[in-house]
Image (cartoon, rainbow, N blue to C red):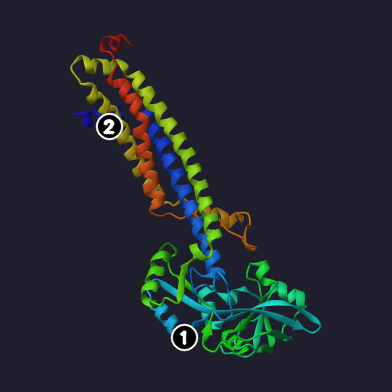
């Protein structure tokens, strides 16, 4: 009976019901937008950072990350790669070799980081070819070619088709040296790395450092960022090799992960402020409704209505309004995502986030809003729970009103 009366009461004061509902709908929309913005931006920046170079998952010989060494290698990497390729959720994988040496062009010399890459797989994994700003990418077969980082090319005053001499140390203790033709210049977005990076075909790098069939790193790209942990566990099960360390980006880029976590904590502070504003608005509307209907509650008690029935009557009214508001807010969020409108406006006006820099790596990011399950159920639960919480005081006030005094209220 109380539920039926509550339905009727919400329709009696249409203006107040509409205003209260609007406050909840606006709160729902703001919460949904804030969560979607945070999740969308978070995923975008992580994908930019990991897909650009690091990979979502990295595989090394145990201890390599703590103390990189020319000798800490992964043997038979082709067979390891084939196993990884068949793991559900893996999109691509790319082998790499790392070492340092001295690079010389003419009379210019400087310290360089030699990076051996599989020209084909690196393009599939990190779209390496799109970072080449001058010249071309490496050939699919070893051809004694080199691509220099933008900063390194400037230091060495390098031009396309010039020759660079590399001197380093081989894994067998010999002096590693050879001459390569510069075929391109790359801008990875990391100025510090580009000041030293010299990319060779992985076969050329193996020959230079006497690392036949061996590499230092396998970078793995997954199809869904949210499933990185699951894919990592699957790879561990499939490989079953205790000599290999398999880590998701949260581990090998721990400082970056912690920075992202701090950023998300800031989002929850903003959400709390939104919830507080909505709660105050709902409290004001419900309290005013109870005060205006004091005489009505007094009459209900006079005819024998129990305090707990009046208490639940007020809660039912608020919950009905809250549930209707959540439904309307969900329809608006799913039927016309704010991300569509925002991205459209940004595409027209060219508005972007300020440039983000991490570890010398710069990201020019756009504003993306992700409409996902979190951006719906968190606002829905928050609106219903906060509405119920702030209506407890008005409900108690209505339940324990004195009939004699209430009947004299105008």
The x, y position of residue 312, in whole percent, is 26, 28
Question: Which residue appears at 76% of the width and 78% of the height?
Answer: 156
Nearer to me, 100 or 198? 100
Which quadrant of the view contains residue 302? top left
Q: CA distance from mark 2 to mark 1?
A: 67 Å
> From where the camera sits, is residue 134 visible?
no
Label 2's element? helix
The x, y position of residue 54, in whole percent, is 54, 69
Answer yes or no: do the residues labelled 2 and 1 have beta carbons within 8 Å?
A: no
Q: Which residue is mark 1?
A: 76
Q: In the picture provided, is 348 more to the left or to the right than 150?
A: left
Label 1's element? loop
Query: Badge 2: how crowded within 10 Å, few (<14), some, or many (20+)?
Result: many
Q: Which residue is mark 2?
A: 316
The x, y position of residue 116, in whole percent, is 59, 81
> From where the camera sits, is residue 128 visible?
yes
The N terminus - image quarter: top left
User: Does 273 sit above or below residue 152?
Assistant: above
Question: Which residue appears at 25% of the width and 24% of the height?
Answer: 310
Which quadrant of the view contains residue 132? bottom right
Q: In the picture provided, is 130 more to the left or to the right than 238?
A: right
User: Does 112 sit above or below residue 336?
Assistant: below
Nearer to me, 70 or 409? 70
Nearer to me, 393 or 167? 167
Query: Badge 1: how crowded within 10 Å, few (<14), some, or many (20+)?
Result: few
């Amino acid at each position: 009976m109380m539920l039926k009366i509550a339905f009727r009461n919400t329709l009696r004061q249409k203006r107040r019901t509409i205003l209260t509902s609007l406050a909840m709908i606006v709160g729902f929309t703001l919460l949904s937008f804030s969560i979607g913005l945070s999740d969308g931006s978070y995923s975008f920046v992580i994908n930019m950072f990991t897909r650009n170079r690091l990979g979502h998952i990295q595989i090394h010989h145990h201890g390599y990350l703590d103390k990189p060494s020319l000798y800490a290698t992964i043997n038979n990497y082709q067979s390891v790669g084939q196993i990884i390729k068949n793991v559900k959720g893996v999109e691509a994988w790319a082998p790499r070799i790392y070492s340092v040496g001295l690079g010389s062009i003419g009379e210019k010399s400087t310290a360089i980081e030699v990076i051996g890459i599989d020209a084909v797989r690196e393009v599939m994994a990190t779209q390496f070819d799109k970072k080449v700003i001058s010249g071309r990418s490496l050939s699919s077969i070893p051809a004694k070619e080199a691509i220099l980082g933008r900063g390194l090319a400037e230091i060495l005053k390098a031009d396309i088709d010039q020759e660079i001499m590399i001197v380093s140390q081989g894994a067998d203790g010999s002096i590693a040296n050879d001459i390569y033709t510069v075929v391109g210049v790359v801008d990875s977005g990391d100025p510090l790395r580009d000041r030293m990076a010299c990319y060779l075909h992985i076969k050329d790098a193996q020959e230079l450092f006497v690392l036949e069939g061996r590499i230092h790193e396998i970078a793995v790209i997954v199809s869904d960022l949210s499933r990185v942990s699951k894919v990592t566990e699957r790879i561990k099960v499939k490989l079953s090799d205790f000599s290999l360390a398999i880590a998701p980006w949260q581990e090998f880029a721990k400082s970056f992960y912690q920075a992202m976590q701090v950023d998300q904590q800031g989002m929850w502070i903003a959400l709390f402020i939104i919830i507080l504003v909505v709660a105050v608005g709902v409290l004001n509307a419900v309290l005013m409704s109870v005060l205006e209907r004091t005489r009505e509650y007094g009459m209900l008690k006079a005819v024998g209505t129990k305090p707990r029935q009046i208490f639940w009557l007020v809660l039912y009214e608020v919950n009905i309004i809250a549930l209707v508001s959540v439904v309307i807010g969900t329809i608006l969020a799913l039927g016309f995502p704010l991300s569509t409108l925002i991205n459209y406006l940004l595409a027209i006006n060219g508005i972007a986030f300020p440039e983000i820099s991490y570890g010398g790596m710069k990201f020019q990011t756009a504003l993306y809003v992700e409409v996902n399950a979190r951006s719906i159920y968190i606002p829905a639960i928050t609106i219903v729970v906060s509405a119920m919480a702030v209506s407890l005081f008005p409900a108690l006030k209505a339940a324990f009103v004195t009939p004699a005094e209430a009947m004299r209220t105008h």
